[in-house]
Image: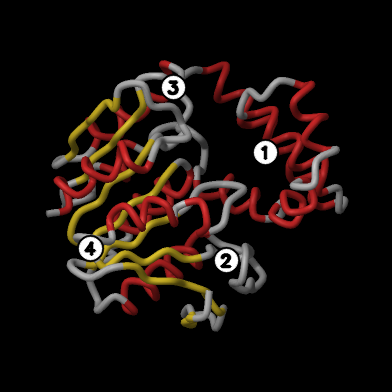
Amino acid sequence: MEKKTLSRDGTPLAYERFGQGPAVVLVSGAMSTSATVVPLAAALSDRFDVCVYDRRGRGESGDTAPYAVDREVEDLAALVDVMGGEASLYGISSGGALVLEAVASGLPVGRVAVYEVPYVMSEDASKERTEYTASLTEALRGGRRGDAVELFLRLTGLAEEMIQGARQSPMWAGMEALAPSLAYDDAVLGAGSVPRARLASIAVPVLSVSGGASPTWMSEAARAVADAIPQGTYRLLEDQTHRVDPHALAPVLAEFFT
């Protein structure tokens, strides 16, 4: 990406814009760069001015220690400024949690959509998240980036043989490069459960979407997000998983953002 802007703390953020129309900023999830949401940006570009960006510590964007969720909120504010001072927001997975926190913090936006924010919905899942956080912190502190990636893939439910296969693949180096940002996504998700009191303060319309082929708890979490927000709406996309097809999602977002 050729364009860059500076966040409040001086961190350079790489971004790209597609199309013309009302402004929309897309936010990616864990273990990803802006490239993961470019297909969605392309699908929306016939009706919107869409911005994608590399979150701090990823891709062509910089990073500034120490990390704090507030810094990522400031990053998003910098991108909204680039788009003219107000935009609608979309975030997938932990990127959705960042979007929700930014809006709850008072970022001026039009409408907000999120896809399958992975809030935990059971005591067992909450315990697993707590153990993951501790193990992830230990692995990253020890410089064991590969182990950190393994922990994340295991948390997502990927089979052990697939994890070991991934370690032998050409993509592994890129995944290790993104490993430190796993701590950022973990921080964005907080305790892991749906932050109902925080979400109740959001005063703009929010669309929370899940896929019909995803695990049941993801749909439960998506519905809980919508229920917690005064102007929240829930939508189920049939046959979709956590890797949602941008061509299935784009018409839903376009209708909501218009």
* Marks 3 and 4 close (CB-CB < 8 Å): no
Disc number lying in front (3 or 4): 4
* Marks 2 and 4 close (CB-CB < 8 Å): no
Residue picked out by circle 1: 133
* Circle nearer the N terminus (1, 2): 2
What amino acid is at disc 1? Thr
Residue picked out by circle 3: 214
Residue picked out by circle 4: 48
SS type, badge 1: helix
* Circle nearer the N terminus (2, 4): 4
Residue picked out by circle 2: 56
What amino acid is at disc 4? Phe
The structure residue drawn at horizontal position 33% and vertical position 60%, both measured from the top left corner, is: 105
Say whether residue 220 is visible: no
Say whether residue 112 is visible: yes
Disc number lying in front (1 or 2): 2
Callout 4 crowding tier (Cα within 10 Å): few <14, some 14–19, many ≥20: many
Residue 113 vs residue 39: left or right?
left
What amino acid is at disc 3? Ser
When the figure is inspected, residue 134 is found, relative to residue 173, above or below; the finding is above
* Circle nearer the N terminus (2, 3): 2
Residue 129 on image: x %, y % = 61, 30
Disc number lying in front (2 or 4): 4
* Circle nearer the N terminus (3, 4): 4
Residue 26 on image: x %, y % = 38, 57
